Image: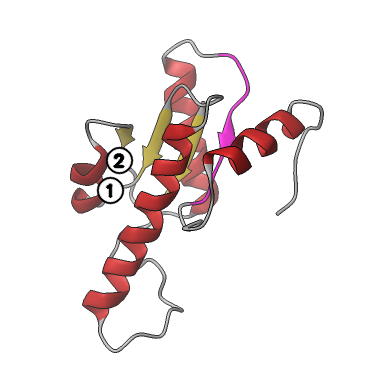
Amino acid sequence: MVVVPIRSLNTGKSRLRTDSDALRRQLALAFFLDTIAALERSVLVDRIVVVSGDSTIGRAVRSRCEIVADDETGLAAAIDIGVEQLRKRQYSGSVAVVLPDLPFATAHAFDTLFLCAQTRSSVSD
């Protein structure tokens, strides 16, 4: 199980310098969708819970991921919301938290990371 918290496209990736807010939003969405695609191809991922209140994000992955709304109170709160959603569904196994801006991540990299994490309580960047 993987939880992917993502801020609204209107506020996400605010440190990214672009010529327009529209381009920044498009880049943030593209980064997120690349990350989701790699997670979907991972043989070790069976469910992805996306935590976001952004309707564009929800529409982009609605048929592929479980969407849980949040009110953008911060990263820690979004993670808690995603984990709680899994617990409500009686899931009691390990949960990985993956940030949404890994556009060059691959399924193989996630598989390696998740296998490594099974022997540790946390894995650094």
- Which residue does the image show at 23% across and 35% down from the upper left? 62
Name the amino acid type tagged 1: Gly
Determine whether label 1 and label 2 are within 8 Å by CB.
yes
What residue is disc 2 on? Answer: 69
Q: Is residue 94 magenta?
A: yes
The image shows residue 112, relative to residue 55, as above or below, that is above
Instruction: Give x and y (percent) for residue 96.
Output: 59, 34
Image quadrant in which you'd find residue 9: bottom left
Q: Which numbered disc flags the more N-terminal residue, 1 or 2? A: 1
The image shows residue 82, relative to residue 94, as above or below, that is below
Q: Which mark is residue 53?
A: 1
Secondary structure state at the residue bearing disc 2:
loop
So how many labels did they put on this image? Answer: 2
Image quadrant in which you'd find residue 19: bottom left
Instruction: Give x and y (percent) for residue 44.
Output: 56, 24
Q: Is residue 103 magenta?
A: no
Query: Of all residues shown, which one is farthest toward the right?
Result: 119
Q: Which mark is residue 70?
A: none
Query: Of all residues shown, which one is farthest toward the top?
Result: 90
* Magenta region: 92-99
- Which residue does the image show at 32% across and 75% down from the upper left? 24
